[in-house]
Image (tube, helix red, strand yellow):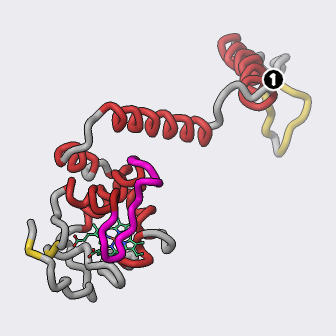
Amino acid sequence: MSNPNVRAHSFDGIEEFDNRLPNWWLWTFYTACIFSVGYWIYYHTIGTGDQPYEAFLHEQQAAAARLEAQLAANPINDESLLKLAKETAFVAEGEKIFKDMTKCALCHKPDGGGLIGPNLTDDMWIYGSRPMDIYETILKGRPRGMLAHEAQGVGFVQRATAYVLSIKNTNVAGGKAPEPDAKKAP
Ligand code: HEC
């Protein structure tokens, strides 16, 4: 073959063309090269753009701020607390508070089954099981050793309330027997 585009070498009789790459292909390549310079500067050199993890954090912060604003704007009542008890992320934050061994878990055990404080997973309540009852208990405390949590702020108390509402009536194994003055509540 005397094709001028065939390269000089041959391997076991296999020869190689050296054709010019099509223009459309070259342009996608050049554009990618130019784009990569801008990309590198934007994301890595001056760091204007968010890395995926930072973008995620910013979204989370924005969502938390929106929720906080919503909390501030809305009155606290049975309905609003029940609504919060259905927000998975909100309940998860309450769970973190509850299971902290320096907080609720210290007296109610991490699973809420009760130790120094009563079992919070049964249907027997001393101070009532309505969302506002639980909220008041956590906010103001109760005389026989339940601490007040006003100092931690309303957001803290709402999160803890949402979590208690989520474990109510789950009857964990090994839970403490009801207190003598507890009454059956829904
Ligand atoms: C220092 C121990 C202690 C800590 C910490 C504590 N509690 Fe209690 N809690 C108690 C005791 C004791 C009672 C019972 C009070 C009474 O009978 O007057 C109680 C009662 C309660 C009740 C009412 C139960 C009922 O039957 O009416 C709720 C709800 C509750 N606690 C939730 C919480 C949450 C949520 C936290 C964390 C934010 C928490 N507690 C932290 C000791 C504690």
Where residue 143 appears, as percent x and y from the top left, is: 30, 72
Judge from the rendering whether residue 53 lies leftward or rightward of residue 157; answer left or right: right
Where residue 94 appears, as percent x and y from the top left, is: 38, 58
Q: Which quarter shows the N terminus?
A: top right
Who's the residue at 30% across and 48% down the image? 87
Where residue 50 appears, as percent x and y from the top left, is: 64, 32
Who's the residue at 71% across and 25% down the image? 48
Determine which quarter of the picture holds residue 66.
top left
Q: Which residues are magenta?
A: 141-154
Q: Which residue is mark 1?
A: 18
Asked whether residue 21 is in view, the answer is: no
Judge from the rendering whether residue 169 lies leftward or rightward of residue 94; answer left or right: left
Judge from the rendering whether residue 88 lies leftward or rightward of residue 24; answer left or right: left
Q: Residue type at mark 1?
A: Asp
Where residue 7 appears, as percent x and y from the top left, is: 87, 27
- Decide: is 44 above or below 174: above
Asked whether residue 56 is in view, the answer is: yes
Q: Nearer the viewer, residue 18 or 28?
A: 28
Q: Quadrant of ligand 1?
A: bottom left
Task: Give the class, few, some or many, for how many residues have Cα within 10 Å of label 1's Cα (few <14, many ≥20).
Answer: few
Q: Which quarter shows the C terminus?
A: bottom left
Q: Nearer the viewer, residue 127 or 174?
A: 127
